[in-house]
Amino acid sequence: MAAAVLEQGEDAFRKIFRLYRRRSPPADLAEVLEFRPGEPRLRSVQFGVGALSDAAAARVGLQPLSDWSGYNVDGFQGFLFIVNPFLPGWQHRWVRQCLKLYPRKPNVCNLDLHMRGAGDLWDGSHAQLRRKSSQRRSEKKTLLEKLRWVTLGYQYDWDTKKYYKEQRSAFPVDLAELSRCVSLACGFPNFKAEAGILNYYHMDSSLGIHVDESELDHTSPLLSFSFGQSSIFLLGGLSRDAAPTPMMMHSGDIMVMSGASRLLYHAVPRILRHPGGGVLPPCLSVPPSTEDTSPLMEPCSPPDWEVCEAYLRSSRINVTVRRVLEEGGNFPEEGDRAAKEGTPGDAYHTEDPEMEERGGPKRIRPGQD
Ligand code: SIN
């Protein structure tokens, strides 16, 4: 592994983050954990037979549970990695939802100010994106390419780093059902999808070191779905002094963070082209499924997929789904809430000064782009 030199005042997590974020010379990826059989740090997971019916799985585009392959990682109790359990041709539908539907009102996105009166993000971008993909010449960025985040359900407030009872839109039914199926399969029958954050990455993007602790319920897992190009995910400890483990995430992979892993520091220092050489990963190179086997989601039409494909050539989409309130729980009274605001360490996202310096993907806050 290339040497990572600790700079003065730098913690162990940040040292590794810098190492993998580096482009020149690129970091040696030999230490990055790939989720495949035979890897000594992995324990294969047996999913509970009957926990999720094949029919329920198929409705959201998942393979029968008996075909899933999942792993725990030594040293990370409560962390579960599921290797792309989607049926061939079905990730396309989820990608289309993430690009075409979820950025729409009443959901909130980083471009809301720009879009006032500008119409729909997808409608305003699809023609230019298709043209770009066929002509291969750079043009001005489309709005879709400027999209950085979308929030669903209880709207995460980037300024206070909290959720509020009144700031809420209906959570998408299809994504709630996908989350229900995955959490059921993983032994969490009480999971409720109450908030979602979608992150849109390009090849030069990274996501700073943070802990997801703004939710009031930490007993439920955090679910994370990845689509498009690959990335390095760093999973650390309860403090930034613990050196993180680098893991490779590919399109379709799902991570479940629960138990002792729910509140660990993590980050995404690097987006990488998927291995294999094609423009898109093989699981996305198959044609979209056109069989309308789900009442929840219509198939991704060929013209829609053309746009998604052009976008994903150099992008990755991550969707995290969280339960915000405990069973029977409620939001704190206004007074408690005000008193807690600004408490160090309660951030969903810790700003990383290096990312700011380099103009990296920054979690752009409402009102900025
Ligand atoms: C990811 O993009 O894989 C992680 C997203 C997050 O930590 O919020």
Image (tube, rainbow, N blue to C red):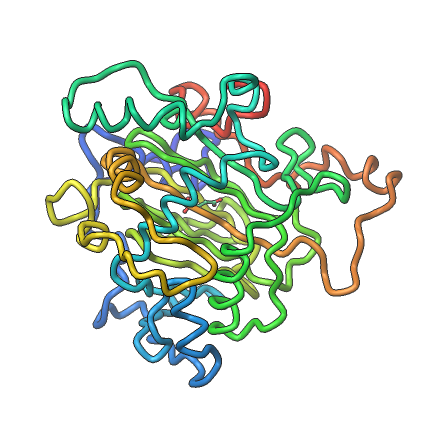
Q: Nearer the viewer, residue 154 or 161?
A: 154
Percent position of residue 133, x then y: 19, 28
Residue drawn at 52 percent across, 27 percent down: 110
- Vertical comparison of 195 with 176: above or below: above
In the picture as drawn, the residue positioned furthest to the bottom comes out as 49
Percent position of residue 177, x then y: 52, 62
Residue drawn at 27 percent across, 57 percent down: 289
Residue drawn at 24 percent across, 34 percent down: 310
Percent position of residue 91, x then y: 32, 54
Residue drawn at 27 percent across, 38 percent down: 303
For residue 281, side relative to residue 189 (left or right): left
Quadrant for ligand 1? top left
Q: Is residue 271 visible?
A: no
Q: Nearer the viewer, residue 351 or 189?
A: 189
Q: How many marks?
A: 0
In the picture as drawn, the residue positioned furthest to the left comes out as 277
Q: Quadrant of residue 39?
A: bottom left
Q: Is residue 255 visible?
A: yes
Q: Nearer the viewer, residue 324 or 76?
A: 324
